Amino acid sequence: GENVEQHPSTLSVQEGDSAVIKCTYSDSASNYFPWYKQELGKRPQLIIDIRSNVGEKKDQRIAVTLNKTAKHFSLHITETQPEDSAVYFCAACPGGGYNKLIFGAGTRLAVHP
Amino acid sequence: GAVVSQHPSWVICKSGTSVKIECRSLDFQATTMFWYRQFPKQSLMLMATSNEGSKATYEQGVEKDKFLINHASLTLSTLTVTSAHPEDSSFYICSGRTSPQETQYFGPGTRLLVL
C-alpha cells in the first residue's frame, strides 16, 4: 500500500525566514496531495492541496510543488511568522476506491521571534 | 470550508465500559466519513472508512468488533469503542467528504481516557 515519508521531523526557523518540508510517496497512482496544519490539541486544518495534473500551486505565503516522476512533493512557507508554529502533515491519496488519505509522520515547525 | 463536529470532546471512563463518539457534518452531506486515531506527538492513523449505508472498511490491524462504526445517514457517523482498556486512550478524530474529488474536513477530535 501507499507509504508517505516526511522530513524533517522538527524544523526551527527565525521569523521572516522560509521553511521547507518535504514528503515522498510510494504509490505512483496517488493523485491528490493535501497539507494540513495542526495546532496542539486541535483538529488538522487544510492549508493547501495539489492534484497530480499540476506541478505547483501557491496561496499567498504558502506554496506546494509536486514532482510526479520522483514521487515527492514539498511545502514552502515564506516570511514565516510565530503563528505559523504548529505541526504540519502531508498526505497522499492513493488510487483505487474510497480515496483514503495516508499521512506522513508530521513536522513540528517552530518560528522564533 | 465545511464544518464537522464531534461529541463528546473528551471522555473519561472505566476499563471495560463502552464509549460512543458521534461525528456530524453540519453543512454538507458526507457520503464518506473516516475515523482516525492519534497518539501524542504522532501522526494520524486511519482506522476505518465508512460509506453511508454500507459496512465500514477497516484498516489492517484494527479490530472491527472492538471499534464499531455506524454511518446511518449522510450527516452522522458513530464510533463505539467496546470494552475499552487503558491502551485505547487516545485522540480520536473523524473527517467527512462529499465525494472522492473533494478534500476531507476534520472534526475537532475526542480525547478518550480509559482508567
Image: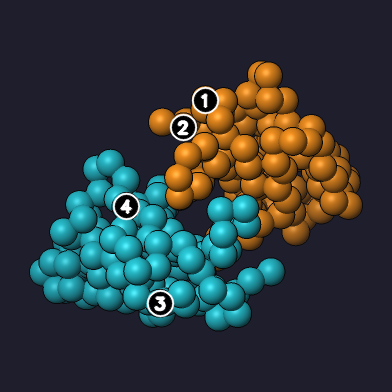
Q: Position of residue B3 (x, y in %)?
A: 60, 74
Chain to which the residue tagged by mark 2 belongs: A
**Mark 1 near mark 2, Cβ–Cβ under 8 Å?**
yes
User: How is the structure coloured here?
Assistant: by chain
- Frontmost of labels 1 and 3 is 3
- Frontmost of labels 4 and 1 is 4
Chain to which the residue tagged by mark 4 belongs: B
Dot placed on the residue nearer the N-terminal end, 4 or 3: 4
The reply to the same-chain question for discs 4 and 3 is yes
Chain to which the residue tagged by mark 1 belongs: A
Callout 2 amino acid:
Glu
Q: Position of residue B66 (x, y in %)?
A: 18, 60
Residue at left offset 45%, top offset 63%: B33
Label 3, residues with CA under 10 Å away: few <14, some 14-19, many ≥20: some
* Picture quadrant where residue B21 is located: bottom left
**Mark 1 near mark 3, Cβ–Cβ under 8 Å?**
no
Q: Circle 2 is placed at which residue position?
A: A2
Chain letter for orange?
A: A
Chain letter for cyan?
A: B
Query: Mark 4: which secondary structure?
Result: strand
Q: Circle 1 is placed at which residue position?
A: A26
- Frontmost of labels 4 and 2 is 4
